[in-house]
């Protein structure tokens, strides 16, 4: 029985899939954080090159991937799709479980899929340096790598809890030539303001974004790069799902459900959007976004206008949010600690197109260990959320006696997360259910936008 | 230009290549460490299952890979072969450089190629537990994984310097269900004897082997597994070279030189032996083994009978050796710190079939960083030795104005070795040239074998 489904280099997608023309209704406007009025593409030019701003608002369904980007993609792409036969057996399920594995990239996750084109377009636009934030370090190391490839400098603001938990990620970024600061840092007004209030702050993606945006906005030759949330980032990630669709054809199966973890939305959208596109052609496919219950943006947040960052410097978007100053606890899935969600995913969740589910971290690590012991690969803690979702769907299939085809995204490997596994295996992982009243509190501070 | 050469699952080799019938002369006998007389296969049955002992002495050129082993191999095999185009450009060489990448395995190196069949044959033979040693942790984590897959227990004696430098490797073994002890440990007579002399001993592969062999020899249900050196281990690794030969055909090139790092010999032989076999068919191909100058077995050792371990419990073999109580300094390429070399490689070196070269660790890390910054992948410190060799050959090709085809083995990734890279990048790596008189000293204690 075949378990590994590989594509040749020639089957690497030539275009990204842009979901915007297929959205169920017009996009909400993006709002200026100062004026609280809608802004146009030109207003974003301080922090992004125009080519990426154009992608952000493009209504073309297919956008060509530049040759220079494909040339780098093919160092690790197309990535493999596996049938998780041993996992199926251990669950005793009639379901067939497949997973698309992005951990084969040089940085160990899906993040280079967007880092490479972002560095490329910035280089073309004459940018000298990119500033960015990183949670678990996956995005920061991917951008460091991409910048080095195109001869750009790179400054990374790394959420402090990850900076401490994952020193190897920091070293990897430095090896690829980036300058790395623990965030909140003393290098920006945004960082200093947080440190003044709480010198021992663990940081958050929202804070790190504030720092990186401020760095870009206050330096002429510097632009900002975001690893998730924005339309153009989600666009770049669709190579995952486009490849997965070709590979599912090789299996002879089509997924009944597609599952991915959700932080800002880039991994989730990368896998899921190309499958959502099949619905127009009459395909029945459920799509499930899984998030941590300690940062339950999609499951307990509201769909409203909010700032993209903590310091209110980033644009305001309509999205699911827990409030821009929501401070998630220092869980190990560092990439899933963001108060908001991508506007595109949010709109689709609000329209009932996407299912959502939240899990505490212990059941996710339990799923990851089961996976590592049956399928051999060590999953990143973020990806563990998708595995938990897939295992639960497989258990349900067993209970209902249904054959069911499950596809999930294994967005990264966990070889640099062994300390987290240690904590789990020794019973030292805490589970956090965020109290609803705390969420109500931060939701009380949303900006008043009327459009 | 194509840079990635992939094989389909159906092209996974069906047989291992056994070099014994093609050796330039008969093999030297294996000697009993107590009687100093030749021993037969039966004498090894305390520590190995008979099926592996048979492979150890087999004169069949092709040995079938069991289906159950191929079934697991194909989780990550065939592994990719890359053209290092960006590395070539950075050197400005007319040489074409290719590398075979084994870092895609679940443990991150070539080691599972032998761990899986060893666990399989032991399971068939009724073994309950396997004991082993590990240097850098690559072998230990591979055997832990293989044991878990076949339902065997696993005890790993991990060289103390690596146990300290690489806590994540230890966690990985534990995640895959193994019990891990820092070696020298208080759990064996061999370990206790070393600790009594030097409580702060860094350990060595020779000591760890003594502990694991003692563990196996003193427990009825326990066998021993070695990650390198022995004929059957080298045999299993030939899948690397067999695949690489198919992939080189896809490139249209044939290597002028094949380069791999050498510790005990398993990675080196796995890539090189299938190419050596082509010489009989009239192919001109140089083969180069690269080792650390702090443990210069092939370049400064002697070809003589010596114990496989420090405590003189393991069989005596004719091999290049620095003396069984040679204590290499705690370099970062933990897998290359063995006093001996595989008897097969040794005989070929003595016969002039294989070239050898030694490098200090700083130039190797320099090569690894160049590689990581051009080719994107982070090499294991062990593999860095092969990269150094390949870069130097490419520089020579430039100086001589010669087109030359270089193939090297990238035996593992270095994502768990970031602390070593940190040390290198901050200028804190020491280079050790082992003083010749120290080597003469340990060579004075070789056993007196007359056969």
Image (cartoon, coloured by chain):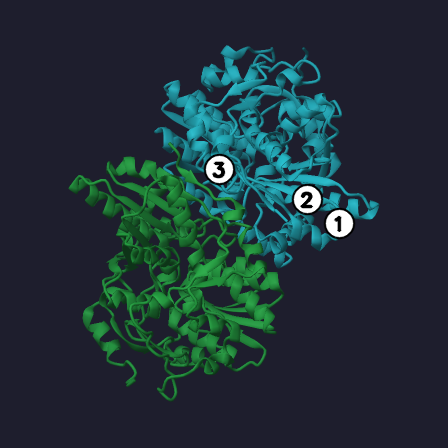
Chain colours: A cyan, B green
Tags 3 and 2 on a common chain = yes
- Left or right: where B150 falls relative to B213: right
**SS of the residue at dot 2?**
strand
- Left or right: where B45 falls relative to A172: right
Res A158 label: 3
Count of labels shown?
Answer: 3
Q: Between disc 3 and disc 2, whose residue precedes?
A: 2
**SS of the residue at dot 1?**
loop
Furthest-bottom residue in view?
B35
Residue labelled with disc 1: A93
Screen quadrant of the C terminus of chain A: top right
Q: Nearer the viewer, mark 3 or mark 2?
A: 2
x and y percentages locating residue A349 in the rendered image = 71, 26
**Residue under the image location 34 percent in, 65 percent down:** B22
- Left or right: where A319 falls relative to B451: right
Please state the chain letter of the residue tagged with numbered disc 3 in the rendered image.
A
x and y percentages locating residue B356 in the rendered image = 25, 60
Relative vertical location of residue B394 with respect to residue A196 in this rendering, above or below:
below
Q: Are marks 2 and 1 in contact (CB under 8 Å)?
A: yes
Q: Nearer the viewer, mark 3 or mark 1?
A: 1
In this orientation, which residue lies closer to the viewer: A92 or B183? Answer: A92
Task: Using the numbered discs, state the Cα–Cα distance from disc 3 to disc 2 in whole angstroms.
Answer: 35 Å
Residue labelled with disc 2: A97
Instruction: Report which quarter residue B146 is drawn in.
Output: bottom right
Q: Between disc 3 and disc 1, whose residue precedes?
A: 1
């Amino acid at each position: 029985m075949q378990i590994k489904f590989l594509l040749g280099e020639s089957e690497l997608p030539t275009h990204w899939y842009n979901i915007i023309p297929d959205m169920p209704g017009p996009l909400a406007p993006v709002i200026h954080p100062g004026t609280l009025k809608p802004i146009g593409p030109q207003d974003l030019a301080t922090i992004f090159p125009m080519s990426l701003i154009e992608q952000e608002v493009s209504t073309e369904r297919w956008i060509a991937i530049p040759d220079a980007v494909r040339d780098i993609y093919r160092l690790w792409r197309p990535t493999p799709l596996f049938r998780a036969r041993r996992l199926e057996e251990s669950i005793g399920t009639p379901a067939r479980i497949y997973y698309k594995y992005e951990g084969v990239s040089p940085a160990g996750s899906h993040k280079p899929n967007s880092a490479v084109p972002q560095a490329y377009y910035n280089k073309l636009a004459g940018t000298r340096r990119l500033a960015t934030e990183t949670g678990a370090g996956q995005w920061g190391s991917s951008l460091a790598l991409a910048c080095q490839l195109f001869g750009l400098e790179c400054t990374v603001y790394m959420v402090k809890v990850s900076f401490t938990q994952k020193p190897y990620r920091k070293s990897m970024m430095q090896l690829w030539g980036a300058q790395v600061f623990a965030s909140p840092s003393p290098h920006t007004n945004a960082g200093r303001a947080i440190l003044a209030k709480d010198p021992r702050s663990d940081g958050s993606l929202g804070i790190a974004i504030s720092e990186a945006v401020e760095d870009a906005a206050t330096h002429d030759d510097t632009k900002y790069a975001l690893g998730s949330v924005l339309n153009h980032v989600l666009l770049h990630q669709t190579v995952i799902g486009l490849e997965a669709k070709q590979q599912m054809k090789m299996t002879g199966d089509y997924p009944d459900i597609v599952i991915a973890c959700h932080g800002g939305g880039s991994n989730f959208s990368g896998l899921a959007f190309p499958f959502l596109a099949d619905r127009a052609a009459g395909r029945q496919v459920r799509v499930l976004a899984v998030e941590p219950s300690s940062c339950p943006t999609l499951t307990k947040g509201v769909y409203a206008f909010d700032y993209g960052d903590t310091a209110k410097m980033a644009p305001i978007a309509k999205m699911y949010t827990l409030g821009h100053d929501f401070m998630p606890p220092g869980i190990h899935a560092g990439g899933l600690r963001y108060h908001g969600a991508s506007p595109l995913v949010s709109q689709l969740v609000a329209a009932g197109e996407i299912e959502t589910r939240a899990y505490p971290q212990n059941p996710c690590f339990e799923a990851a260990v089961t996976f590592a012991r049956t399928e051999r690969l060590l999953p990143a803690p973020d990806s563990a959320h998708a595995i938990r979702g897939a295992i639960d769907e497989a258990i349900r299939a067993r209970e209902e006696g249904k054959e069911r085809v499950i596809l999930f995204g294994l967005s990264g490997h966990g070889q640099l997360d062994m300390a987290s596994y240690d904590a789990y295996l020794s019973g030292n992982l805490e589970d956090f259910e965020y109290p609803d009243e705390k969420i109500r509190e931060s939701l009380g501070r949303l900006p008043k936008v009327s459009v």
